[in-house]
Amino acid sequence: PFHRNVDNPIGAMVQSVTMDADTLEIGEDPSGQLAQFIKMLMNKNKTFRPPNARAALEVFETIVRGVC
């Protein structure tokens, strides 16, 4: 998510370690739940991420059920 903001790969790598990514703006996600889900998956602090892929899928399915 940082490659557009820097002139070289080293800068992108430094930003990926030191900065959080911006929250996405997804037109089909007016409530922002999908964008927040993606941000949660990218959180640098693993305690704020789902503990495994199954837990992430459960969160995703809850979001999808709420939208559909």
Image (cartoon, rainbow, N blue to C red):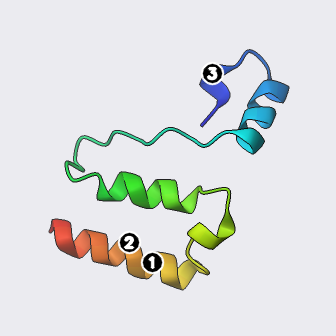
Q: Where 67 falls versus 35 (above or below)?
A: below
Q: Quadrant of residue 17?
A: top right
Residue 66 vs 40, above or below: the answer is below
The local crowd at label 1, few if under 14, some if 14 to 19, many if 20 or more residues have their Cα within 10 Å, is few
Q: Quadrant of the N terminus?
A: top right
Q: Residues within 10 Å of mark 2 (few under 14, many from 20)?
A: some
Residue at image coords 67%, 56%? 44
Labels 1 and 2 touching (C-beta < 8 A):
yes
Point out the residue furthest to the top here: 7
* Helix, strand or loop under label 1: helix
Query: Farthest residue toward the right?
Result: 10
Residue drawn 74% across and 30% down?
Answer: 12
> Tags 3 and 1 in contact by the CB under 8 Å rule?
no
Marks 1 and 2 sit apart, C-alpha to C-alpha, by 5 Å
Residue found 57% across the figure and 68% down from its top:
48
**Label 3, label 2: how many angstroms apart (C-alpha)?**
29 Å
Q: Residue 5: image x %, image y %?
A: 63, 21
Q: SS class of the residue under badge 2?
A: helix
Question: Which numbered disc, 3 or 2, marks the residue that appears first in the sequence?
Answer: 3
Residue behind mark 1: 57
**Towards the viewer: 48 or 16:** 48
Residue 63: x, y in percent? Answer: 29, 70
Reading the image, the residue beneath label 2 is 60
**In this picture, residue 28 sits left or right of residue 13:** left
Q: Amino acid at mark 2?
A: Phe
**First in residue order: circle 3 vs circle 1:** 3
Q: Secondary structure at mark 3?
A: helix
User: According to the image, label 3 marks what residue?
Assistant: 5
Give neighbour class at mark 3: few <14, some 14-19, many 20+ (Cα, 10 Å). few
Q: Amino acid at mark 1?
A: Leu
Taking the spot 52% from the left edge, 84% from the top edge, the residue there is 54
